[in-house]
Amino acid sequence: MKSITKQKTFEEIEQQLDGFDRVYIAGCGTCATMTKTGGKEEVLEMRERLQELGKLVTGWTVIPTACDEMTEVAIKENNGAIQNAKCILVMACALGVHKLSTYIDKPVIPALDTLFIGVEDSPGCFQEVCAQCGQCVLGQTAGICPLTACHKGLLNGPCGGTDNGKCEVDKEKDCAWTLIYQRLEAQGRLDLMRKYYSPRDYNAVLRPRTIRIT
Amino acid sequence: MASSFREVLKSDKFVITSEIGPPKGTNIEKMLHHIDLLKDKVDALNVTDHQSSVMRFPSIGGCLAIKEKGGEPILQVTCRDRNRLALQAELLFAYTRGIRNVLCLTGDAVVVGDHKAAKGVFDLDSTQLLMTIRQMEAGKDLGGNELDGAVEFCAGAIVTPEANPIEPQLIKFEKKVEAGAEFFQTQAIYDLDKFAKFMEHARQFPVKILAGIILLVSARMAKYMTENVPGVFVPQNLIDELAAAPKGEAINKGIEIAGRMIATLEKESICDGVHVMAIGKEEVVPDILKAAGLAT
């Protein structure tokens, strides 16, 4: 499971850094390294591009896992360079940006857009399989989540936009309900697809979603 | 007040519906002209709801215009743009203004339309919308609260008889029937043998099926539909027929083809009626009905 990110356009990064002449760059050694959006290589490339822009890069680091508790230690180790900077450019997912913002009393600027929590299907190919909705229906849908895999998140079967097992929004994308149908049929459980599912309860977990494990 | 369209559905008459596409903008002259032209020639007129996710004048506005002119409107309601509160409110309003027929649709994806950055809502799906209508008819809203004045609608849905694979669509069709759909207007059909097979299945259910007939205006359009519109397959012989038409005559060939198909569906009692869609060429619908021998 990985937090999947993509780098913002350099133009947007430049806009966000407007007015900050000294920048510290923080990457992440876990997901963003894996997706080649915030590993050492990308951080060094960013440093070069910012220098070309005339920015002073006061330092850089690749935090082992930007979203965990060790981040505080990593930040302390680099305290001097961070103090010299006007802002921190974070090349981690939004979880890392959030974590850093709790330790650093300086503007924290995201260099990446966080797309989804995904699993790696085949090397380098990530897919969203769970929307973390708080009401799991996988038991009725043969392990394929219609909220995530169906573009419209339909609960009661396919829409009329499916064709040859593909989705109307992308001819390369499988229709979730065709896949669910095929699996349920193979398992002899099509009765589950014939069942009516009521509208979802969007109140199941209120935003912001929090939980305390006791 | 019962829906007069429901009475027509209950009768043995071969039902004819057509549809009106509202304008993008406030110039409704053309839409009103189409309503005048068609309202007395069909049993009911659908008004599309941001068809293909393209923002337009609303279905309810077109339905009210039909009502004012003495026609029988079918309000198209998709789940793409409104959550369950807004959908229910629309149904309450429609009922108070004498609209008695609703076609429940999931709606096309936002990204196929002209506001690609918009949020697709899909709080409900088409089956849940049908259930919502039945619950509101029983005097309760979706929150379980009492309504001060209920609704009553002749509710319909859509089905794609030539979808591949067909089985998942048939399951959805049956769920819509169970959820209270009284009539179905189908996606465009062109292969009558295939459609007849679907009808053998559909006949088991107590619903009326109106075959979708989309006017083909050129061989190019026929090919485009086959390649790009999900669940639509125009057989090669029809494409050839259109291609062989003299220059400028393809539309007349299309009218002839549509008329011929409708006539066959009626004569052989394959289905209960037709829903004629002449997307952008509404003025030729009377010609199609004439070609089918159904002009009144």
Image (cartoon, rainbow, N blue to C red):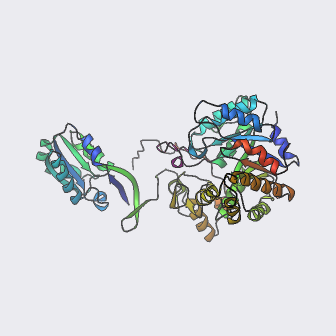
Q: In which quadrant of the rendered image does the N terminus of chain B lie?
A: top right
Residue B217 versus residue B89: which sits nearer the camera? Answer: B217
Give the dominant element type of the magenta stretch: helix, strand or loop: loop
Return the x and y of residue B34 as percentages of the image width and height: 71, 37
Return the x and y of residue B166 as percentages of the image width and height: 67, 63
Residue B111 versus residue A146: which sits nearer the camera? Answer: B111
**Dividing the picture into quarters, in which one does residue B80 lie?**
top right
Per the rendered image, the range of residues in magenta is B106-122
Q: Position of A8 compared to A147: left or right?
A: left
**Dividing the picture into quarters, in which one does residue B260 lie?**
bottom right
Return the x and y of residue B271 as percentages of the image width and height: 81, 56
* B29 w.r.t. B52: above or below: above
Residue B193 versus residue B81: which sits nearer the camera? Answer: B193
Can residue A79 be seen from the camera position used here? yes
Q: Is residue A103 magenta?
A: no
- Residue drawn at (78%, 53%), measured in percent from left and top? B259
